[in-house]
Image: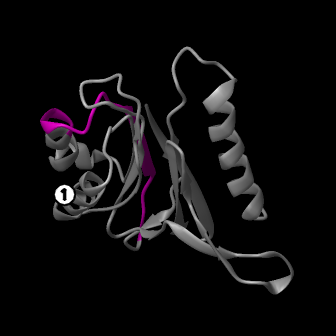
Amino acid sequence: LSSQCPAPLLEGRAAPLTLDFYNITELGDKAKERFGSKKGKEADVIGVVEHHKIGKEIKQSRNWAQSCGWRSTWSSARWTGRSDKGTAGGAAVLSEKHLHFSSAMLCGKGGEKASTEMKGMDWTAVLLKLRGQTVIFIAAYLTSGLGLRGENIRKISEIVRFILKMNL
């Protein structure tokens, strides 16, 4: 899935902002080859779900993304015992380093300052500050076959609470 937003300024020139989204089976060699290559750099921002990474693997994945020229934010997969790795889900957003990227924010009502992490169970978000506009990019993995029940409702509720905290 790919989308282009109307011509924000990137590096001082008018150009479309390209956003891509991938549902992968894991962040393995094939996916790393895609996102680490010049072809993978056709998008300015990439959302990835179902990476299956947990614990130390998240830090390793963040370091890998940085070595490929991306800024990134990651939400952990969770233990299920059902896949080859025993995990499911997980979401990441990778952004070109030249974009002003934020994955945590200060917000609060009535002037209070509170740090809000922009991620939850199987979703993560970034704010991209562009000239005259802010783009919110959320990558979320909803459990297949579940519909709007159970853990999918919890995930959507977390995202809605996050959006409401932003006072949009």
Residue 153 vertical placement versus 113 (above, below)? above
Amino acid type of disc 1? Trp
Q: Quadrant of the C terminus?
A: bottom right
Q: Where is residue 142 in the image (x, y as percent from the top left)?
A: 54, 30
Q: In which quarter of the image is the N terminus?
A: top left
Q: Residue at x 37, y 71 (%)?
A: 11
In magenta stretch: residue 17:
yes
Q: Residue at x 21, y 58 (%)?
A: 60
Residue 122 vertical placement versus 110 (above, below)? above
Among the 4 quarters of the image, the one containing residue 49: top left
In magenta stretch: residue 76:
no
Q: Where is residue 153 in the image (x, y as percent from the top left)?
A: 69, 33
Residue 101 horizontal side relative to residue 108, left or right: left
Residue 109 horizontal side relative to residue 139, left or right: right
Residues 64 and 40: in front is 64
Residue 94 horizontal side relative to residue 28, left or right: right
Q: Which residue is drawn at 34% across and 70% down?
A: 98
Mark 1 burial class by Cα count in 10 Å: few <14, some 14-19, many 20+: some
Q: Where is residue 73 in the image (x, y as percent from the top left)?
A: 40, 59
Residues 40 and 114: in front is 114
Task: Give the residue pinned by disc 1.
Answer: 64
Q: Position of residue 83 (x, y in %)?
A: 31, 23
Residues 19 and 114: in front is 114
Among the 4 quarters of the image, the one containing residue 31: top left
Residues 45 and 121: in front is 121
Q: Which residue lies furthest to the top in this view?
A: 145
Q: Which residue is drawn at 16% across and 63% down?
A: 67
Tag 1 secondary structure? helix
| Structure colour scheme | one colour
Can residue 131 be seen here? The reply is no
Can residue 128 be seen here? The reply is yes
Q: What stretch is highlighted in magenta?
A: 13-31
